[in-house]
Amino acid sequence: MTDGISADCSNLGLLNSPFFMKNVISANLSFNFLTSLPDEGLLPAGLKFLDLSSNKISNFSHDGLPPFTTSTTLLSLNLSNNYISLDSKTYFKGVFKNLFDLKILDIFNNSYEIISYYCPDEVFVDLISLESLSIDGVKNVTFGRRFAHLHNLTSLKVAGLAARGTIQKDMFQHFPFIRFLDFSSRTEWRNIEHFAVLIIEQGTIKNLPHLEVLDISYNRRLGLCGFRNVSYDLPFTSIKIFKAQYIACERSGSSWLLTSDVSPLNKTQLLELYIDGNNLDKTETSAVYLLPRSLHVLSITDNRWVIDDYAYFDNLLNLVNLTTVDVSFQNMHQMSHSHNSYRCNNEYLLLNPMKCLCYRLQDKRFLNLNKKNRLLSNRKFLRSTIS
């Protein structure tokens, strides 16, 4: 932070913004009861960081004039957890015209899941310096072609995708420069009985050639079929870190990690892989051999692993760059669940892991011929169990 004063006015029950001295460069007004942005003149001209998160703000302006006329040097603006609807009326033309230096914008968790919104991409083109964007991707929201003009935008966090059910392959096509993509659902447990990401279409990640870090964690109903679709896209990116943690319901059945699930990763230069908390109890031995040799960190904690051939250390010897393997906290599902774990299950969803396993077993391109009959027999057994 550059030289100046940081003013923390968070959680004080404020209804209006106070006046800030001219040498204040960081103002934290989060967790108050503000219903609008601070009036022009209350914020100093040299302000760099402004946090207005967790208030009751519903618009940028009452008179239709662009805000922040006296705070044009802002670098970071946090408006998350307010009531600012993602539509063309709220995001009027020129709303960001004074924020040409802004690098970080956080406007996620402002939209209700049950309402359809429209994302006015034309207003975001004024954010010519923007590097990081956190935004809602709820029902019917699309990110239009004008986002492609934001050449400095390399980090994208999307909330609310659970309301969509399916993430279509064109969802991120206008973010060609993205290096960091996060659509994990850590904050969306509250509605998991009604909303959940069920499908990520294959091809969704394929058009992000510069992508280095991807997090799809905590989409509890996504399962390994969703993991598989994403893994098949990753060879077309620059992926270094892939997080797919807790993409299974805690109370659902165990599953296997197949060779064909991870084989596309062998075509990447992946450094870190996190597949914790996915109810995995077995994997094919050949799957271990097809993990990329570039791997430094492998985290498979909080699963249900049982001892088998794949578990022996010599199977990891091909991973010559591996420095960390974390297999702690196995079979914890027998002792505890999170508070909301019951919301993720019903009679239909309990069968989904088995259906997904059967679907994945149909792809035998990477299976060892000596195991073919055994796997086909397992598939028939699972089909008879489902029926």
Image (cartoon, rainbow, N blue to C red):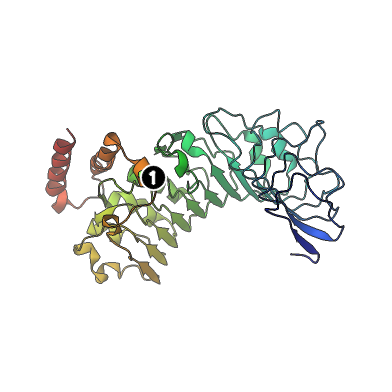
Q: Residue at 52% x, 29% y: name it.
A: 114
Residue 292 falls in which quadrant of the image?
bottom left
Q: Where's residue 163, x and y in %?
A: 48, 34
79 relative to 27, above or below = above
Amino acid type at circle 1 is Arg
Name the residue nearer the viewer: 236 or 200. Answer: 200
Name the residue nearer the viewer: 27 or 116. Answer: 27
Q: Residue at 86% x, 47% y: name it.
A: 70
Q: Where's residue 140, x and y in %?
A: 54, 29
Can residue 322 be spotted in the picture?
Answer: no
Q: Residues within 10 Å of mark 1 (few under 14, many from 20)?
A: many
Q: Where's residue 109, x and y in %?
A: 58, 41
327 relative to 73, above or below = below
Name the residue nearer the viewer: 367 or 78. Answer: 78
Q: Which residue is mark 1?
A: 220
Q: Where's residue 122, x and y in %?
A: 70, 33
Lateral position of residue 83 relative to residue 186, left or right: right
